[in-house]
Image (cartoon, rainbow, N blue to C red):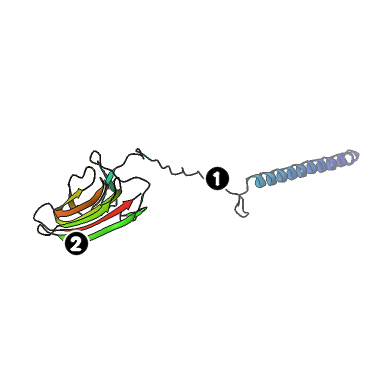
Amino acid sequence: MDAEADGRPHSRAGDRLRAAVLAGLAVAALIAGGSWWRANAPVTGPPSTAPTATPASPAPRFEVVGDPERSVTFRVDPVTGAAMRMDPQPGAGAVEPFRRYDDDGWLDRPGELIWRERTTLTQERPVTRQTATGYGARHVLQFRCTGPGELRVSVLGARAGDPLTSGCDGSLVTTQAISRGGPLRVTLSTAGAEPVRVEARLVAVP
C-alpha cells in the first residue's frame, strides 16, 4: 500500500515533463513553419514602378562621300527620285553642291530665272533662245523631255559647248554653261524624226 503511494507522485511529474517537452517542440515547429512560409510566399503587392533599363538604339550615322569641290552633272530619275551622276565634258562647268533644288530637281536658289520653255519639238520645229551675257557669266541649264524620240541640245557662246543628246524618259538633266562673252544661244531640237515634249530652264547663278 505504501509502495503504490510512493510511485504516483513520480509518475505524475514525468507526465508533466513529457507534456512540456512536446508543447515546446510544437511551438518551435510552428515558428519554423511560419518563417519558411514568409520567405517563400509569392509577392501579392502592386507591381514595381521602378524604371527598367532598355538597350540604347544606335544613333544613325550619316557620311558625306566624294569631293565637295568637284563639280558634276547629274540626272534625276523621275520614278525613284534618285540622282545619277554623269561625267561632265572637259572644261564644262557643273552644278555646285551648295545650291538648293526643289522636290522635282529644279534649281531653287540662288539664281535668277532667265527663261523657261515648255513645248513640243518636231523635226521641222526646233526652239532657240538667246541671252546677252558677259564674259565668264555662269548659267545653269536644266532640261527634261518625254516622248518616243531623243532630244538634242546645243549651246553656242559657252565654253565646251558641244551638243548633247538625251533620251526622253522624263529624267531631269542639269549642267552649267560658262559664257565666253557675248550672246549665249541654246537650241533645243529632236535628234530624229520622232517628236518630243520638252521642258527647259536657264538660270543665271553667282
Secondary structure at numbered mark 2: strand
Amino acid at pointer 1: Ala
- Position of residue 65 relative to residue 153, above or below, is above
- The x, y position of residue 46, in whole percent, is 61, 55
Quarter of the picture containing the N terminus is top right
Q: Residue at 31% across / 57% down in the picture?
A: 113
**Residue 170 appears in the rendering:** no
Q: Which residue is mark 2?
A: 119
Residue 148: quarter of image: bottom left
Whole-percent x and y of residue 119? 19, 61
Q: Which mark is residue 133?
A: none
Mark closest to the chain's N terminus, 1 or 2: 1
Query: Foreground residue, 49 or 19?
Result: 49
What is the spatial separation of the Cα atoms under label 1 and label 2, in whole angstroms? 63 Å
User: How many residues crowd around disc 1 within 10 Å: few (fewer than 14), some, or many (20 or more)?
Assistant: few
Q: Residue at x 20, y 56 (%)?
A: 145
* 76 with respect to 37 (left or right): left
Residue position for label 1: 53
- Type of amino acid under label 2: Thr
Kind of element beneath mark 1: loop
